[in-house]
Image (cartoon, grey):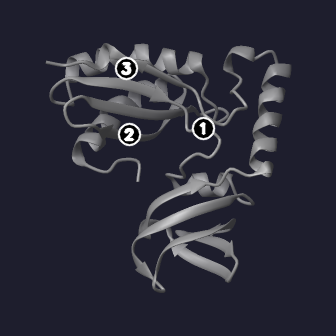
Amino acid sequence: MRATNPVEERVIALIEPTASGLGYRIVRVRLSGNRRKRLQIMAERVSDGQMGIDDCGRLSRALSPVFDLEDPVQGEYDLEISSPGIDRPLMRIEDFERFIGHEAKVETAAMIDNRHRWRGVIKAVEGDEIVLATDTGDTRLKFSALSEARLVLTDKLIEEDLKRARDAEAAGDEENSSPASGGGASEASGGGESD
Protein backbone atom coordinates (compact mmCIF):
# COMPACT_ATOMS: atom_id res chain seq x y z
CA MET A 1 0.00 0.00 0.00
CA ARG A 2 2.99 2.32 0.35
CA ALA A 3 3.25 2.46 -3.45
CA THR A 4 0.67 1.95 -6.20
CA ASN A 5 2.90 1.56 -9.28
CA PRO A 6 6.48 0.66 -10.31
CA VAL A 7 7.66 4.31 -10.37
CA GLU A 8 6.55 4.83 -6.75
CA GLU A 9 8.17 1.52 -5.76
CA ARG A 10 11.44 2.66 -7.39
CA VAL A 11 11.27 5.98 -5.53
CA ILE A 12 10.82 4.17 -2.21
CA ALA A 13 13.79 1.90 -2.94
CA LEU A 14 15.94 4.94 -3.81
CA ILE A 15 15.05 7.15 -0.84
CA GLU A 16 14.64 4.68 2.00
CA PRO A 17 18.36 4.34 2.82
CA THR A 18 18.81 8.13 3.04
CA ALA A 19 15.61 8.65 5.04
CA SER A 20 16.44 5.79 7.40
CA GLY A 21 19.94 7.16 7.94
CA LEU A 22 18.39 10.45 9.09
CA GLY A 23 15.94 8.70 11.43
CA TYR A 24 12.83 8.86 9.21
CA ARG A 25 10.47 6.15 8.01
CA ILE A 26 8.77 6.47 4.60
CA VAL A 27 5.02 6.09 5.15
CA ARG A 28 4.02 6.22 1.47
CA VAL A 29 4.86 7.71 -1.92
CA ARG A 30 2.31 8.99 -4.46
CA LEU A 31 2.94 10.37 -7.95
CA SER A 32 -0.01 12.36 -9.33
CA GLY A 33 -0.84 14.84 -12.05
CA ASN A 34 -0.60 14.79 -15.83
CA ARG A 35 0.91 17.96 -17.28
CA ARG A 36 2.64 18.96 -14.04
CA LYS A 37 3.41 15.96 -11.85
CA ARG A 38 3.61 16.01 -8.06
CA LEU A 39 5.69 13.50 -6.13
CA GLN A 40 4.40 13.35 -2.56
CA ILE A 41 6.56 11.62 0.03
CA MET A 42 4.86 11.07 3.37
CA ALA A 43 7.31 10.39 6.19
CA GLU A 44 7.63 10.31 9.98
CA ARG A 45 10.36 10.17 12.60
CA VAL A 46 11.15 6.59 13.60
CA SER A 47 11.61 7.69 17.22
CA ASP A 48 8.08 9.00 17.85
CA GLY A 49 6.05 8.91 14.64
CA GLN A 50 5.92 12.71 14.39
CA MET A 51 6.99 14.94 11.49
CA GLY A 52 7.33 18.70 11.86
CA ILE A 53 8.06 21.41 9.30
CA ASP A 54 11.78 21.32 10.15
CA ASP A 55 11.79 17.56 9.57
CA CYS A 56 10.13 18.02 6.16
CA GLY A 57 12.78 20.57 5.15
CA ARG A 58 15.64 18.42 6.40
CA LEU A 59 14.40 15.35 4.51
CA SER A 60 13.70 17.38 1.35
CA ARG A 61 17.24 18.78 1.32
CA ALA A 62 18.71 15.30 1.85
CA LEU A 63 16.63 13.70 -0.92
CA SER A 64 17.13 16.36 -3.61
CA PRO A 65 20.65 15.12 -4.57
CA VAL A 66 19.32 11.54 -4.74
CA PHE A 67 16.65 12.62 -7.23
CA ASP A 68 19.14 14.72 -9.21
CA LEU A 69 21.44 11.72 -9.54
CA GLU A 70 18.91 8.93 -10.14
CA ASP A 71 16.07 10.81 -11.92
CA PRO A 72 13.31 8.26 -11.13
CA VAL A 73 10.42 10.36 -12.54
CA GLN A 74 10.33 11.32 -16.21
CA GLY A 75 9.63 14.96 -17.02
CA GLU A 76 9.18 17.87 -14.65
CA TYR A 77 7.62 17.37 -11.24
CA ASP A 78 7.23 19.06 -7.88
CA LEU A 79 8.57 17.30 -4.80
CA GLU A 80 6.42 17.50 -1.68
CA ILE A 81 7.48 16.12 1.69
CA SER A 82 4.64 15.83 4.21
CA SER A 83 3.69 14.29 7.53
CA PRO A 84 1.01 11.63 7.81
CA GLY A 85 -1.17 13.98 9.92
CA ILE A 86 -3.32 12.88 12.83
CA ASP A 87 -5.83 10.87 10.77
CA ARG A 88 -2.93 9.15 9.05
CA PRO A 89 -2.99 6.31 6.55
CA LEU A 90 -2.21 2.88 7.97
CA MET A 91 0.32 1.41 5.56
CA ARG A 92 2.08 -1.36 7.50
CA ILE A 93 0.79 -4.01 9.87
CA GLU A 94 2.88 -2.29 12.58
CA ASP A 95 0.71 0.83 12.11
CA PHE A 96 -2.36 -1.19 13.08
CA GLU A 97 -0.53 -2.55 16.14
CA ARG A 98 0.51 0.96 17.17
CA PHE A 99 -3.06 2.29 16.96
CA ILE A 100 -4.97 -0.53 18.66
CA GLY A 101 -7.97 1.03 20.39
CA HIS A 102 -8.44 3.70 17.71
CA GLU A 103 -11.09 3.86 15.02
CA ALA A 104 -10.14 3.16 11.41
CA LYS A 105 -11.72 3.01 7.96
CA VAL A 106 -10.47 0.21 5.72
CA GLU A 107 -11.13 -0.86 2.15
CA THR A 108 -10.35 -4.15 0.45
CA ALA A 109 -9.37 -4.65 -3.18
CA ALA A 110 -11.86 -7.51 -3.63
CA MET A 111 -15.32 -8.00 -2.16
CA ILE A 112 -15.37 -9.79 1.21
CA ASP A 113 -18.80 -10.72 2.62
CA ASN A 114 -20.36 -8.53 -0.12
CA ARG A 115 -18.47 -5.45 1.07
CA HIS A 116 -15.42 -3.37 0.22
CA ARG A 117 -15.49 -0.95 3.18
CA TRP A 118 -15.42 -1.30 6.96
CA ARG A 119 -15.25 1.11 9.86
CA GLY A 120 -14.46 0.08 13.40
CA VAL A 121 -12.07 0.16 16.32
CA ILE A 122 -8.80 -1.69 15.81
CA LYS A 123 -9.19 -4.44 18.39
CA ALA A 124 -6.15 -6.63 17.68
CA VAL A 125 -3.55 -7.75 15.18
CA GLU A 126 -3.20 -11.52 15.05
CA GLY A 127 -0.52 -12.67 12.66
CA ASP A 128 -1.45 -11.20 9.28
CA GLU A 129 -5.06 -10.44 10.30
CA ILE A 130 -6.53 -7.17 11.51
CA VAL A 131 -9.45 -7.50 13.93
CA LEU A 132 -11.92 -4.60 13.79
CA ALA A 133 -14.73 -4.16 16.31
CA THR A 134 -17.58 -2.94 14.07
CA ASP A 135 -21.27 -2.21 14.67
CA THR A 136 -22.06 -5.73 13.47
CA GLY A 137 -19.42 -7.48 15.60
CA ASP A 138 -15.76 -8.36 15.12
CA THR A 139 -14.46 -8.46 11.55
CA ARG A 140 -11.22 -10.18 10.59
CA LEU A 141 -9.43 -8.95 7.50
CA LYS A 142 -6.12 -10.15 6.08
CA PHE A 143 -3.65 -7.28 5.82
CA SER A 144 -2.77 -8.38 2.27
CA ALA A 145 -6.44 -7.94 1.23
CA LEU A 146 -6.48 -4.23 2.16
CA SER A 147 -6.24 -1.59 -0.56
CA GLU A 148 -6.56 1.44 1.72
CA ALA A 149 -6.74 2.12 5.45
CA ARG A 150 -6.63 5.23 7.61
CA LEU A 151 -7.40 6.41 11.10
CA VAL A 152 -10.65 8.25 11.79
CA LEU A 153 -10.26 11.66 13.44
CA THR A 154 -11.76 11.22 16.92
CA ASP A 155 -11.53 13.10 20.21
CA LYS A 156 -9.39 10.26 21.61
CA LEU A 157 -6.93 10.50 18.72
CA ILE A 158 -6.69 14.30 19.01
CA GLU A 159 -6.21 14.05 22.78
CA GLU A 160 -3.32 11.58 22.38
CA ASP A 161 -1.69 13.76 19.71
CA LEU A 162 -1.95 16.84 21.95
CA LYS A 163 -0.43 14.87 24.84
CA ARG A 164 2.49 13.77 22.61
CA ALA A 165 3.03 17.38 21.54
CA ARG A 166 2.99 18.60 25.17
CA ASP A 167 5.40 15.86 26.23
CA ALA A 168 7.78 16.75 23.39
CA GLU A 169 7.62 20.43 24.32
CA ALA A 170 8.21 19.66 27.98
CA ALA A 171 11.27 17.64 26.99
CA GLY A 172 12.66 20.73 25.28
CA ASP A 173 12.04 19.35 21.82
CA GLU A 174 10.01 22.32 20.57
CA GLU A 175 11.35 22.27 17.01
CA ASN A 176 10.22 18.67 16.58
CA SER A 177 6.82 18.90 18.27
CA SER A 178 3.95 18.30 15.87
CA PRO A 179 1.19 20.81 15.26
CA ALA A 180 -2.04 19.81 17.00
CA SER A 181 -4.24 20.96 14.13
CA GLY A 182 -4.36 17.54 12.49
CA GLY A 183 -3.43 18.83 9.07
CA GLY A 184 0.12 17.58 9.26
CA ALA A 185 3.25 19.41 8.25
CA SER A 186 4.24 19.75 4.65
CA GLU A 187 6.98 21.34 2.59
CA ALA A 188 6.74 21.63 -1.16
CA SER A 189 9.93 22.01 -3.11
CA GLY A 190 10.58 22.75 -6.74
CA GLY A 191 13.93 21.01 -6.37
CA GLY A 192 12.52 17.79 -7.78
CA GLU A 193 12.38 19.12 -11.30
CA SER A 194 13.94 16.95 -13.91
CA ASP A 195 14.61 17.24 -17.62
- For badge 1, the amino acid type reads Gly
In the rendered structure, the answer to whether residue 88 lies left or right of residue 100 reads left
Q: Which of marks 3 and 1 is nearer the N terminus?
A: 3
For disc 1, the neighbor class at 10 Å (few under 14, some 14 to 19, many from 20) is many
Q: Residue under circle 2?
A: 29
Q: Name the residue under label 1.
A: 85
Q: State the residue at coordinates (48%, 66%).
A: 107
Q: Which of marks 3 and 2 is in front?
A: 2
Q: What residue type is labelled 3?
A: Leu
**Distance Cα–Cα, label 2 vs label 1:** 15 Å
Location of residue 48 (image quadrant): top right
- As drawn, the residue found furthest toward the right would be 170
Q: Helix or strand or loop: what does disc 2 sit on? A: strand
Q: In this view, does 140 lie above or below 160?
A: below
Which callout, 2 or 1, points at the residue further toward the start of the chain? 2
- Give above or below for 44 relative to 117: above
Quarter-wise, where is residue 17 in the image? top left
For the point 50% across and 15% down, the residue is 58
